Image (spheres, rainbow, N blue to C red):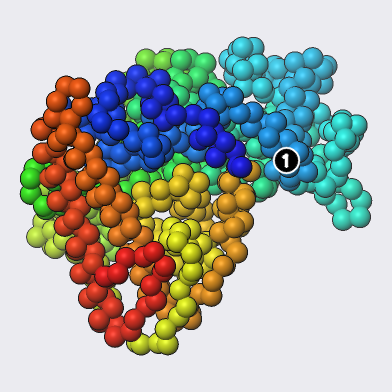
Amino acid sequence: MSVVEEIKQKLDIVEVISQYGVPLKKAGRTFKACCPFHPEKTPSFIVNPDRQSWHCFGACSTGGDAFAFVMRWEKVEFGQALRLLAERAGVSIPDRLQEQNRDEPAGRLYEVNEAASLYYHHLLRSSNAGETARRYLEGRAISPKTTEEWQLGYSPPGWDDLFQYLNKKGYNVDDMAAAGVLVEKEGKGGYDRFRHRLVFPIFNRQGRVIGFGARALDDSHPKYLNSPQTALFDKSRALYGIHRAHGAIRKLDQAVIVEGYMDVLMAHQSGYDNVVASLGTALTQGQVEQFRGLTKNLILALDADAAGQEATLRGLAVAQETMERRVVYAPARSGRTAVVRREEEYAEIKIAVPAVGKDPDEVLREDPALWDKALAEARPVVDYLLGVVSSRTDRSGPRGKRAMVESILPFIAEIKSPVSRESYIGRLAGITGVSEKDLGNELAALMRPAVKDTRPVKSQPQASGPSGDCEEDYCLSLLLRHPDLRPHGLDLNAEFFSDSENRQIYQTWIDRQDADQVCESVGEHLKPRLDSLMIPGHPDPEPGRLVAFFEDCRAQLEQKRLKEQIRQLGILQQEAEMGGEQGPDRELASQLEAEELALNARLMASYRARTSLRAGRKSGLPQQPGGSGG
C-alpha cells in the first residue's frame, strides 16, 4: 500500500473537511454545506463518504478527494497536503521513505546543502575570518536576528575548507559537485565554489536549502555568484525568500518582487513579509508560476536604474504571458441547460517606482514611508509602459512610433474593460501620432482568436488502443511519453483526473518541459506512479495519427467524468427528494436537477463534436475499453 492510500484508509473525508470548520449537515447518505470556496445561500457543496470525495455543483464546479480539498483550502501543493494529512493520520512519511531515500540523489543533495549552510553560518557567527562579513552586514543595517533567521553565512578564503569539512561528514567529491558547492576538476578532485564571500542560502517553499547565492567581500568577480544548475536548484524557477513569504503573500493576497538578496532581507526586517526576489534577473515564467495558488496580485519593485527598468520590462512580458486571463466554464445556475462562459483575470500586475537612484533596501533603511508610498501608488502595467517606453523611444520617425506601438499594444489587448482599452488607445495615439482608428484595427487583430486548422486528417490504418479500464492513466501516459503532444495537453482540464496522484503529476507536467524534469520535481511518494505511467502497457498509434488519437482519448476521458458527475447528481437529487429526518429538500433537488441538465447538455455536445471529428477524418479511432461510445 502506498503512503497516499494508507492516509486515505486512515482518514475520513467528512472528518477532515469538518475539522476546517465547514458545517456539514447529513443529507441521506451524503453531507452538504454552503461551499467554503465561494459565497452562496443555497448549499451546493456535497461530500460523499462512500466515495470519500467532495464536489461543488455551484460556481466552483470542481471537486476531488481529501488531498484536493486540503490543497485548495490551504493553497498548497500536493507534497504539503500530503504532509498535513499524514500528520493527522499518524503516518510518518520520513520513516516510510527513509530507506528508499537514503541513496536517492535528491535526498543526498539536500543533506550536502544543509550541512554546508550550517558550516557557513557557524563561520559567520563565530570565526575571526568572518569578521569582514559581519562588518558588511552591520554596514547594511542587517540585524543579528535577521542573520540568524535567514541562516546567512560566510565562506572562508581557502580552496578546500568546505571540502575538508564535508568530507569528514561522509560526503565525497561527487556529492559536493552534484550539489554545486564544489567545482570539480578533471582528475584532481575539486575546489570550493564560494571563497571569501557572504553566503545567502536559498530555500524552497518547504524551507529546505536548494542552493546558494554569495557576494564577494573584496574585488573578486563576479560580484554575486550563484549555485550552478543542479537537480535541486534552477535559478530560473527559484525565488529568494519564498519560504518565509508565502504565508504573508497568501494572507495579504499580494506579492512584491524585488531583485536582490539585501532588498528581501531589509523588507522582511522592516515588517514587509510578502517580499521575494528574482535572484537579480528579469522574471522568468518558472518564477511567476510560483505565485499560482498564492495570489493574483503582483507588484514589481525593481531597481530604479536603467538596468532595473530593462529587467522590469522583460519581467512584464513574462508575467503577462504566464499569468494571463483564463476562460473557465461553469454550469448555469438556472434551470436552463446552457453552459455559461465566465472569465477570470488571473493576475493584476502593477509597477512600484522607488526613489530615483535608490534600490529598495536603501529606501527601506532611510525612509520606510517612501516604500509605503511607492507600493500604494503602484501603477498598472500600461501606465508604467507609456511613461518608460515613451521616454526611451525616438518618436520622430515611423520606426520609433512602430517600436512603441509594438511594445505597448499587446498589453492593452490584455485589459478586460473596453472603456479602459479605449482610453489607453487614445493616450497611445496622442503620444505616437498614430490615428486611433489604425491602433484600434491593430488591437482588434491582436484580440481576434486564432483560427484552428480544421482540415480532415487523412485516413490511416487503425491503431491499437489501450486495454484496461483506466482512461486517465493512459491519457497521462501519452503526454509523458510523447513531447509532441504538449501543446494539445496544456489545456486539458485537471479535474478530469479523479486520482490526486495523477492530477499532481499532470500539474507538475504543466510546469515542466519533459518527463525527465517531471521525474526530478515530483516527491518520492509519486515516483512509483510516475514509473508505471512511463511504461507503455499497450502499443501507441503511428506518429502521424498520434495527435488525433490523443484528442479522442481526451474526449473519452471528458465523457467519462461527465457521466460520473451526472450519476452522482442523480443519486443526490433522489436523496434530496426523499429527504431525511427534516423532510425533502426541494430547493436542493431543483438546483441539482438544473445542474444535471447542464451536464447532460455538455455530454451531448461532446458526443456530437467527437462524432463530427471522426466523420471528418473518415477513420475510426479505436475505443478504449470502458470508454464512451459516441
The quarter in which the N terminus is drawn is top right
**In the picture provided, is 485 more to the left or to the right than 558?**
right
Residue 51: % across, % down: 39, 40
Above or below, comparing residue 143 to residue 453 in the picture:
above
Residue at screen point 69% across, 37% down: 97
Above or below, comparing residue 178 to residue 439 in the picture:
above
Residue 612: % across, % down: 22, 76
Total marks shown come to 1
Residue at screen point 18% across, 48% down: 596
Q: Amino acid at mark 1?
A: Asn
Between 318 and 52, the one nearer to me in the picture: 52
Describe the element under mark 1 as helix, strand or loop: helix
Residue at screen point 14% across, 63% down: 441
Residue at screen point 55% across, 39% down: 4
Residue where numbered disc 1 is placed: 101
**In the picture provided, is 498 more to the left or to the right than 431?**
right
